[in-house]
Amino acid sequence: MLNIKLNKLNNIKQDFTIKDLENISGIKAHTIRIWEKRYNLLSPKRSETNIRYYTSEDLTKLLNIVLLNNNEFKISKIAAMSDEEITLQSRELAFKTAINDEAINSFKVSMFQFDKVLFNNTYNTLLHKKTFRDIFKNVFIPFLEHIGLLWHTETLLPAHEHFISNLIAQKIQINTEKLQFNIISTNKTYVLFLPDNEIHELGLLYLNYELVLRGFHTIYLGQSLPLANLNYFLQGDREICFITSLTIQPYDDKIEKYFYNINELMTNNNHKFIAVGRKVQKVKHLDLSSNITMYDSISDLLKVL
């Protein structure tokens, strides 16, 4: 049933090279080949041009093998298991443990197999032993950083990232909702948004959670907001602090103009504007209003809030 559903999705990567497997699993290609020849753990197929490739099932099996091997299962013992036993043992282990590396490995499996049940069970297991903040900082962030590396190696497709990002976003939103009565009396409001065509919002969602946790009043506007919309918030009496996160947008040839527009927006008022993300390095040299502050990462911003 799962394979039928996957095949109906567009652009889902089904075939992987041994380099893909190395990038995703962290196991060297040389070691993977040894496991193939000595233990027959994987059986790569060959294309019409005789090029070796692996299926999504091979990838999942390898990740399960790595999970077991990292938890004192010898390769020889794993090799003696059937594919079904490897799957069952690894899933049981993932559900029982809350070790960061193993959780990250389980999240990889859930991402490539579009397995929401595995994701939620792994997350809930972590939640029994860690706070949500610990999970995000020590598990989700390293996991998302690894996803970023997979993008550069062209191992990951948008469908994989969208699936896992949406699941993580749901967890952030659920934990933020639990804090709805945590707002303290203050005249300051944080307005959070992403620039036009920017859709990478996990960092901003988490920042919103941290602000609400601290008792601040926030207005979360989300993805792809035209800058002109911010004028509405400048008309009231409340002190406003805008926060935006720049991952992809604006593109390098437009980012200076974007910040000059921000500068014009923030001129002649006492409101604040905070920009975070890797793109701010492109504009730190600009002569902008003192109301505008930049941080390389959300972690850097949280240190001063």
Image (cartoon, rainbow, N blue to C red):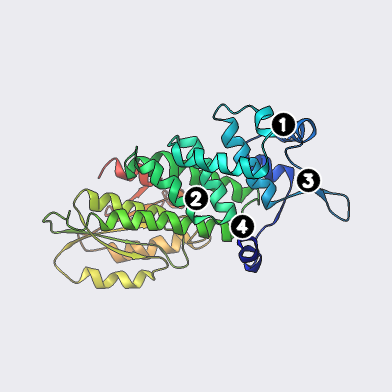
Q: Which residue is mark 1?
A: 31
Q: Earlier in the sequence, mark 4 or mark 3?
A: 3
Question: Residue 211 appears at what percent x and percent y?
Answer: 25, 51
Would residue 133 appear left or right of 13 to someone viewing this image?
A: left
Kind of element beneath mark 4: loop
Q: Earlier in the sequence, mark 3 or mark 1?
A: 1
Q: Which residue is mark 2?
A: 118
- Label count reads 4
How many residues crowd mark 4 within 10 Å: few (<14), some (14–19), many (20+)? some
Amino acid type, callout 4:
Leu
Amino acid type, callout 2:
Leu
Q: CA distance from mark 4 to mark 3?
A: 21 Å
Q: Earlier in the sequence, mark 4 or mark 2?
A: 2
> In this rendering, which labeled residue sits more in front, label 4 or label 3?
3
Question: Residue 154 appears at what percent x and percent y?
Answer: 66, 52
Q: Which residue is mark 3?
A: 44
Question: Residue 242 appears at what percent x and percent y?
Answer: 29, 59
